[in-house]
Image: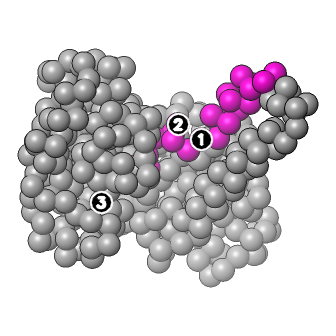
Amino acid sequence: MDEMTKVAVDAMGGDNAPGEIVKGVVEAVSESSKIKVYLTGREEVIRKELEQYTYNKEQIEIVNATEVIETAEPPVMAIRKKKDSSIVVALNLVKKGECDAFVSAGSSGAVLVGGQLIVGRIKGIERPPLAPLIPTETGCALLIDCGANVDARPSHLVQFAKMGSVYMESVMGIPNPKVAIVNIGAEEEKGNALVKETFPMLKNCPEINFIGSIEARDIPTGYADVIVCEAFAGNIILKLYEGVGATLIKKVKAGMMTSLRSKIGALLVKPALKQTLKAFDLEEYGGAPLLGLNGLVVKTHGSSKAIEIKNSILQCLTFKEQKINQKIKDKVILKDE
């Protein structure tokens, strides 16, 4: 078991906890024998859920936690007061080195605050960004940052670009990933004060393949592999992405049911359409890693189903095997010193 990737999973966080969380965990360990999961939360509740499944008992362990941090609670206060919550207990497993990673669909604020206060930043990292993968026409891109730092400085964005490049090259296997900064135009002189100050710094950064600005409409085309922005813009991009995607899928399905001819056509194109729509389903890409911490922290959607939990756990396996934190230290920290 020593060589396994050990992942602490918050069993009580999210709209569909604990059912979908436990189901996702079972699916993950069934898919990979290299993972051991520590489910944190109310033991009797978790045990009852696990009774429904057949799985390798050595790959799942329950760690009792009597408290739950609710979404509406102030994050800092909740982390400090609820020491026996499923989130805090799990984060402490990572801090102590007993686990390599942490996955939660619970309170975003608590996960972000807890990640920084309990797990801690890698020395030299100014701000850890939240970085989800988003689907594009050519595959996927990393949106960095989408929720952790709404008031970022230029130096933060430069580190985001470097960490994003390391992640896309090592985890997604994209050599020399293309990096772009979110802007309101392609011209270098456009943008707000933050973008104008950051642009030349990225342009003169030899560790990344910077290709300039990217407008929001070009993100889905796959124009860039790493999309750099502060969290205010990033969160808007992510939420719009999710909303438009869900609306289009509903519209397509409704349109196929309008007449007998469209229904027959729907049956003919169903296999190809299902595969295409699957590629644009954010759940297929797992959660958003909070990069730059001493251990991996992954935040999944509050509405996560089992498939996203499973993919987030498998994501942790790749993160460890590719030694992402060591690469961040080598390529981001040491280069800055």
Q: Which residue is mark 1?
A: 281
Q: Quadrant of the C terminus?
A: bottom left
In the image, 18 versus 180, the foreground residue is 18
| Label 1 crowd (10 A; few <14 / some 14-19 / many >=20) | some
Q: Nearer the viewer, mark 3 or mark 1?
A: 1
Q: Is residue 65 above or below residue 57?
A: below
| Label 2 crowd (10 A; few <14 / some 14-19 / many >=20) | some
What's under tag 3, amino acid-wise? Val
- Please tell me whether residue 278 belongs to the stretch shown in magenta: yes
- The CA distance from mark 3 to mark 2 is 21 Å
- The CA distance from mark 3 to mark 1 is 23 Å
The residue tagged with tag 2: helix, strand or loop?
Answer: helix
Q: What is the x, y in percent for residue 141?
A: 60, 45
The answer to whether any part of residue 299 appears in the image is no
Is the Cβ of the residue at disc 3 closer than 8 Å to that at disc 1? no
Residue drawn at point x = 52 percent, y = 36 percent: 284
Q: Which residue is mark 3?
A: 111
In the image, 296 versus 59, the foreground residue is 59
Left or right for 130, reference 169: left
Left or right for 276, reference 239: right
| Label 3 crowd (10 A; few <14 / some 14-19 / many >=20) | many
Q: Which residue is mark 2?
A: 284
Q: Which residues are magenta?
A: 267-295
What's under tag 2, amino acid-wise? Glu
Residue drawn at point x = 14 percent, y = 71 percent: 80
- Please tell me whether residue 70 belongs to the stretch shown in magenta: no
Q: What is the x, y in percent for residue 222?
A: 71, 44
Q: Is residue 240 above or below residue 250?
A: below
